[in-house]
Image (cartoon, rainbow, N blue to C red):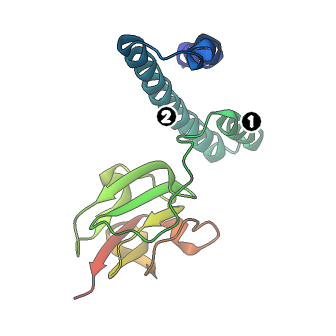
Amino acid sequence: MRNLILTFLVLLITGPAFCEDTEKTKLPDDAASALADFDKAVAAKTKELRAKLEKAQEAATKKGNLDGALAVKAAIEKLPKDSDAPAPKSKSTSKVVTLYTLPDFKGQSVTIKDYNVVMDAHAIGFPNDALRSIKLPAGCTLVVYQNEAAGGASLEVTEESSDLTGTTAVGMTSFMIKKQK
């Protein structure tokens, strides 16, 4: 992990200096392509680092190391954003449901195409108790369950939400997507 962080920091620090003079004249296609590849590599490493840090933060929290969890959170907040574009504010027109671990449709995400099937979060690669935002097509309802296999208390989410923090939906362990007929 230390090598990943060091690589990322070198790319982050040298990237802007390397690209400063390219704004004055048009770059040849091969150089423009190389810079685009560089930007993609930085974005991919940032995403990878963010995921590892989020796991480290979760582990520190579970161990009761709140100071460590807060320190990791501060490191995550220093990372460049996934995209300079603002998060979409409009309702989803997609036919799929996407769950996110962070507000504003950010963080780890899982896209689901299956309706009327109970799914356990961990079985599809989504962390338990981590739902923070959701893209939900019109006419769909997400039923969130407290326990695996649709057990325990439930809550219905009927519209897209950019921030579920503070709701009982964040305690999701299993869920089902229902499509209205």
Q: Residue 174: percent from the left, percent from the top?
A: 37, 66
Q: What SS does tag 1 mark? A: helix
Kindly indicate the quadrant of the structure image that contains residue 151: bottom left
Q: Which residue corresponds to mark 2? A: 47
Between circles 2 and 1, the one closer to the viewer is 2
- Give me the residue at 59% from left, 40% from top: 81
Q: Residues within 10 Å of mark 2 (few under 14, many from 20)?
A: some
Crowding around mark 1 (Cα neighbors within 10 Å: few <14, some 14 to 19, many 20+) is few
Viewer-proximal residue among 37 and 30: 30
Q: Between disc 2 and disc 1, whose residue precedes?
A: 2
Quick one: quadrant of the N terminus?
top right
The structure residue drawn at horizontal position 38% and vertical position 18%, both measured from the top left corner, is 33
Give the camera-side residue of 175 and 136: 136
Three-letter amino acid code of the residue under disc 2 = Lys
Residue 94 placed where, x, y %?
31, 66
Q: How many marks?
A: 2
| Residue plotted at (48% across, 30% down) | 43
Residue 119, x across and y down, in percent: 29, 64
Q: Identify residue for label 1.
A: 71
Dot 2 falls on a residue whose secondary structure is helix
Q: Quadrant of the C terminus?
A: bottom left
